[in-house]
Image (cartoon, rainbow, N blue to C red):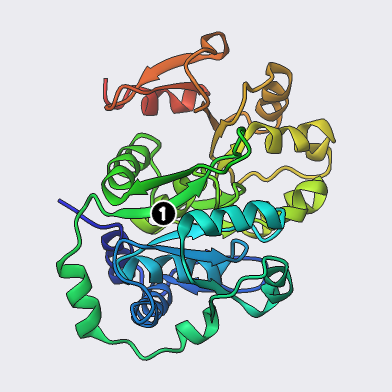
């Protein structure tokens, strides 16, 4: 039984060392490169953090950022991504809750970091990745690790005015991703088109499905969701097969008639959540991509939209499928 998500990364690095693991607008990394970067970063972070403590990461989602995330895990810690565009007052509250005198960032975010008036030590991601790996240190950390150790922390919107942190452990992610990837048949042949911000837990489905299965995760630039034609070009260029998107993101394309420009016909699976999917918009997607599997993962109250199926852990998902996908729906009946 796996006890750490690092086993996902290490197994994929062995199976698919030269395959692209993550790619953003400007760069990419293979599974082997990610593992190596993470181990070096973990070695460096271990000098500043003791296991089971939070590593604040003041960055936007990117290939560089995933290296820091995995480095934090190799250091026996858990990562907390801080959105660089959030108000300084909120970020200061989060830093106060984390009670950390060290923060990780990169050069492009230094100006944004100044607004926090952070008095602690600032570690630069490229410097961490340049550290020489210390296998003995990493092994010692790994030997004392438990599957219930924290993996990441996220903060809610703070409706009371005070951000509330939620910490999720390795075991929770391992159990969920094992089920999620099996149920939706995510494999090394897939390309995940990541839309969700990495300080939202929806992004876990993209990040860890990729690490587990060897699927490539394409990090879609946020600004493209304001330009449907450019977004569609990106999906086609990056050969994206799987979308785990918010309903609002899907509706941007259908509202602005994006499919009249081009159709990203490599897409095979679309999983949506965040709110109820309007039937009008679902039907537009189905018109242009009729053979795609559409799955509602928002909740259990929208049975009028399609057939319903329970998975192993009792959650309900709603499937919209063509006749070709009938075999998939029936596979474990």
Q: Residue furthest top?
A: 304
Q: Residue furthest bottom?
A: 132
Query: Residue 225 location in percent, x, y?
Result: 75, 47
Query: Residue 302 location in percent, x, y?
Result: 54, 13
Residue at 40%, 36% (x, y): give it.
184
Residue 239 in view in this figure: no
| Left or right: 121 as drawn, with respect to 2 | right
For mark 1, does the 10 Å Cα neighbourhood hold few (<14), some (14 to 19), or many (20 or more) residues? many
Image quadrant of residue 106? bottom right
Query: Residue 220 location in percent, x, y?
Result: 65, 56
Residue at 79%, 53% (x, y): give it.
230
Query: Residue 272 location in percent, x, y?
Result: 57, 32
Please give the count of numbered marks on the rendered protein. 1
Image quadrant of residue 111? bottom right
Q: Which residue is mark 1?
A: 152
In the picture, the quarter occupied by the C terminus is top left
Q: Nearer the viewer, residue 186 or 123?
A: 123
- The local secondary structure at tag 1 comes to strand
Residue at 37%, 38% (x, y): give it.
180
| Left or right: 311 as drawn, with respect to 28 | left
Residue at 77%, 32% (x, y): give it.
254
Q: Nearer the viewer, residue 320 or 55?
A: 55
Q: Nearer the viewer, residue 161 or 169?
A: 161
């Amino acid at each position: 039984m796996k006890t750490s998500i690092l086993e996902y990364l290490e197994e994929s690095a062995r199976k698919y060392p030269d395959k692209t693991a993550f790619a953003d607008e400007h760069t990419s990394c293979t599974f082997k490169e990610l593992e190596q970067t993470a181990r070096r970063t973990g070695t460096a972070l271990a000098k500043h953090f003791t296991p089971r403590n939070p590593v604040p990461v003041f960055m936007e989602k990117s290939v560089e950022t995933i290296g820091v995330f995995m480095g934090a895990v190799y250091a026996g810690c858990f990562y907390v991504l801080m959105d660089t565009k959030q108000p300084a007052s909120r970020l200061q509250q989060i830093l106060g809750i984390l009670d950390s005198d060290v923060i990780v960032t990169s050069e492009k975010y230094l100006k944004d970091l100044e607004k926090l008036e952070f008095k602690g030590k600032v570690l630069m991601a490229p410097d961490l990745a340049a550290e020489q790996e210390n296998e003995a240190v990493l092994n010692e950390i790994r030997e004392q690790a438990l599957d219930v150790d924290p993996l990441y922390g996220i903060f809610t919107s703070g409706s009371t005015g005070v951000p509330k942190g939620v910490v999720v452990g390795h075991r929770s992610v391992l159990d969920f991703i094992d089920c999620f990837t099996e149920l939706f048949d995510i494999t090394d042949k897939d390309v995940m088109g990541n839309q969700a911000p990495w300080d939202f837990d929806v992004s876990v489905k993209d990040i860890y499905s990729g690490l587990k299965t060897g699927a490539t995760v394409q990090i879609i630039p946020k600004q493209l969701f304001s330009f449907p034609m450019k977004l569609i070009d990106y999906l086609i260029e990056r050969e994206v097969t799987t979308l785990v998107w918010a309903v609002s993101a899907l509706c941007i394309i259908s509202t602005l008639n994006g499919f009249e420009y081009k159709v990203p016909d490599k897409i095979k699976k679309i999983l949506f959540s965040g709110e109820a999917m309007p039937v009008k918009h679902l039907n537009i997607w189905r018109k242009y991509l009729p053979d795609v599997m559409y799955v509602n993962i928002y909740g259990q109250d929208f049975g009028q939209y399609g057939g319903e199926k329970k998975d192993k852990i009792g959650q309900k998902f709603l499937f919209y499928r063509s006749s070709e996908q009938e075999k998939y729906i029936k596979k474990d009946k």
